[in-house]
Image: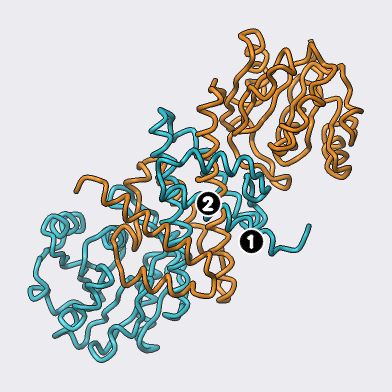
Chain colours: A orange, B cyan
Amino acid sequence: MVNYVIFIGAGNLATNMAKALKKTNYRIIQVFSRTRESASTLAKMVDADYVTELAEVRKDASIYIVSLKDSVLTDKVAEIVNGKPDALILHTAGSISISVFEGYAAHYGVFYPMQTFSKMKEIDFKSVPCYIEASSAKDLIKVKQLAEALSDHVEECSSEQRKYLHLAAVFVCNFTNHLYDVADCFLHEHQLSFNGLLPLIDETARKVHEIKPGEAQTGPAIRFDENVIHMQSALLHGHPVWQDIYNLLSKSIHENNKKLPNP
Amino acid sequence: MVNYVIFIGAGNLATNMAKALKKTNYRIIQVFSRTRESASTLAKMVDADYVTELAEVRKDASIYIVSLKDSVLTDKVAEIVNGKPDALILHTAGSISISVFEGYAAHYGVFYPMQTFSKMKEIDFKSVPCYIEASSAKDLIKVKQLAEALSDHVEECSSEQRKYLHLAAVFVCNFTNHLYDVADCFLHEHQLSFNGLLPLIDETARKVHEIKPGEAQTGPAIRFDENVIHMQSALLHGHPVWQDIYNLLSKSIHENNKKLPNP
């Protein structure tokens, strides 16, 4: 049996997921995005139609994958679900409860792939940890089938747990990337290249595969090397927010360390 | 000609560097550390003697590699250099100027390997970017020989530039690792495993090999998804410092984004 799928949203996550789904026996028949450019680009990639108005979304698909900005999903849920009583409606958001669909849809669930997606870089979806949840045991089977067609790492997870996973993802991905960005910006200001940092960035990531991050901590803050801390903070005087980041993270590293038993 | 080397300090960096140096034609004859355990452990690894008093350090080596906490190096420089007029004295610190040796030593320099080192995890030193500097052109040749015996990525760099490289290293390594640690701690509080984050951590690091970090930014803060930002910040109410980190980094991501030209 072929499952017909419609993507509501054509952002980074939807693009990567749709491209991966195209390689399975699911068939994507339509893509919706309010941005014509995004809708048409993704639709073309996966050989589907596209629409830019929610009212024009076909009602005869068996699965709808809703991947919109969280506030938009919350606002538009009634309109999205409307007229699709037998379909399975899924969202992909880390921080939205499954209950967002309650009272609107009969069959619904969550498919949260915990990864960072860009349109310009293709991800091997098989290795993406995917956290799923559904409105009933029967619907869960369907969500699981979809998830296992895409990924080798599928786990059930409650909405409550998913909130913490998403928060953790924000720390290790979004915030980490921002630290890379800050470093890139001030190296650039001093005519130095970011590329020299790549072996260090890689090793920092690799290390926590073997050692707990709490034990892997190095640098002036954990040694409480005050001279270095003051001097480095002063280097950032032209960038008050970056200086605040420097001071706060140094303080937090030092305080975490004090809480540990002495070695 | 065999070069006889003495390590002043037996911490993470010294341990990794000494182990790598042992595989070259340099010969390590002694290790100093005030901590007997550290001194003897490293000395044993590299078949050298060890001492725990600076006054007992042999004076007949050709190269001394000083790898101490920055404040200790600054305080002890006279004692370290004393009685070794022909030797080459190097330090390995990112943030200390080469001038720390001025007026004390005749031949000196800096060898700064930009990597994160743990005693429990061996690093392939060949891939570590090493930044060098010396008191004279003649001494630079010696520092370069040593550096090139250890690493395939050796670059000259002034003390001023090295300060910014070290600051960048603190951001992308020490601070990043601390974000991993915070995530590990609160996942643990909620009976969730850190290991599920590893594919995301790896991809976040891998991504900036291909895309500039400023373009790789994803997540609620760059989308300015206020509902999610407030909800996630509230999840951290029991940990004021982590909540401050969340709020400050979210604000900084959002502000950086506003400065960019519209896409």
Q: Amino acid at mark 2?
A: Asn
Number of other residues with Cα within 10 Å of mark 1, as a class: few under 14, some 14 to 19, many 20 or more: some
Q: Secondary structure at mark 1?
A: helix
Q: Amino acid at mark 1?
A: Asn
- The chain containing the residue under callout 1 comes to B
**What residue would you read off at disc 2?**
B247
How far across and how far down the image is residue A118, in percent?
Answer: 69, 45
Number of other residues with Cα within 10 Å of mark 2, as a class: few under 14, some 14 to 19, many 20 or more: some
B234 relative to A238, above or below: above
Picture quarter containing residue B64?
bottom left
- For the question of whether residue B2 can be seen, the reply is no
Picture quarter containing residue B41?
bottom left
Q: Residue furthest bottom?
A: B103
How far across and how far down the image is residue B157, in percent?
Answer: 46, 78
A85 sits left or right of B117 in the view: right
**What residue would you read off at disc 1?**
B256
